[in-house]
Amino acid sequence: MSALLSVKNVRKTFGDEIVLADISFEVKDHSATVFIGASGSGKSTLLRCINLLEQIDDGVMSLDGQEITAVDVDPDQVRRRLGMVFQSFNLFPHMSVIKNITLAPIQVHGIPKEVAYEKALALLDRFGLREKADQYPDRLSGGQQQRVAIIRSLACGPRLLLLDEITSALDPVLVNEVLVTVRDLKNDGMTMVIATHEMGFAKQVADQLCYLHQGRILERGTAAEVIDDPKEPETKEFLARVHSAGRL
């Protein structure tokens, strides 16, 4: 099966700081690739590079066989095929839930308003938020806001969904409802690249798990291989810290 996303020898610096060094991996269609690692290891920067929100210094990235890092590529056209959910919900506070979800389909993709609303309501219904359609974000819990942010990304029918530490801003009580939503997407075959600190969640959804350390993929494999039987000392040390913090 060919790769939906291919990342080869990607390098990213901020000034003199090397944030990503020689990053290479592939993401197969209908699979989930999960990145774990300490804060500052480069996980968020990597996802921002894939979404072309950050320009890489070297390397090549391809989506569905098209090189998306070529100089003549329009980033906006690439992002039409990508969905990204951030740590902060980034919902427009002055818009209702339904308008947050339908803004891009209508304004960017040119989908008729009636069609966009119908799809948005179907997604809200699927994820148990239909009754929140006309409410504003400040009337929702953090978990509900993040689920709306995920639905907003799904409304445009992305080929690839990028999830950047989507539970880090949530109260622990609300984390599970968001993770259940992602597990449902995984079961539906959505292709995803995920950065997370939630090791139990990573074990449940990862087809490929990568441990990122100081901007390099230090270890990769199945979740069982990396989390239950790590080979590298740095991986073992990181997982020991995660375990002592009660996240494993």
Image (cartoon, rainbow, N blue to C red):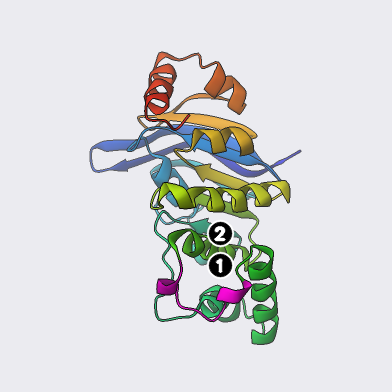
Neighbor class of circle 2 (other Cα within 10 Å; few <14, some 14-19, many 20+) is: many
Indicate which disc residue 83 carries: 2
Q: Which residues are magenta?
A: 130-140
The reply to whether residue 117 is in sight is: yes
Where is mark 1, residue-wise?
152
Query: Which residue lies at the image location 53% right of the left edge and 66% below the top edge?
Result: 148
Of circles 1 and 2, the one toward us is 1
Left or right: 11, with 155 as reference point: left
Element at label 1: helix
Query: Which residue lies at the image location 44% right of the left edge and 33% below the top edge?
Result: 247
Single out the residue that lies furthest toward the right: 1
Where's the N terminus, which quadrant? top right
What amino acid is at disc 1? Arg
What amino acid is at disc 2? Gly
Query: Which residue lies at the image location 61% right of the left edge and 61% below the top edge?
Result: 81
Examine the image and state in which quarter residue 129 appears.
bottom right
138 is within the stretch colored magenta = yes
Number of marks in picture: 2
Quote the CA–CA distance across marks 1 and 2.
9 Å
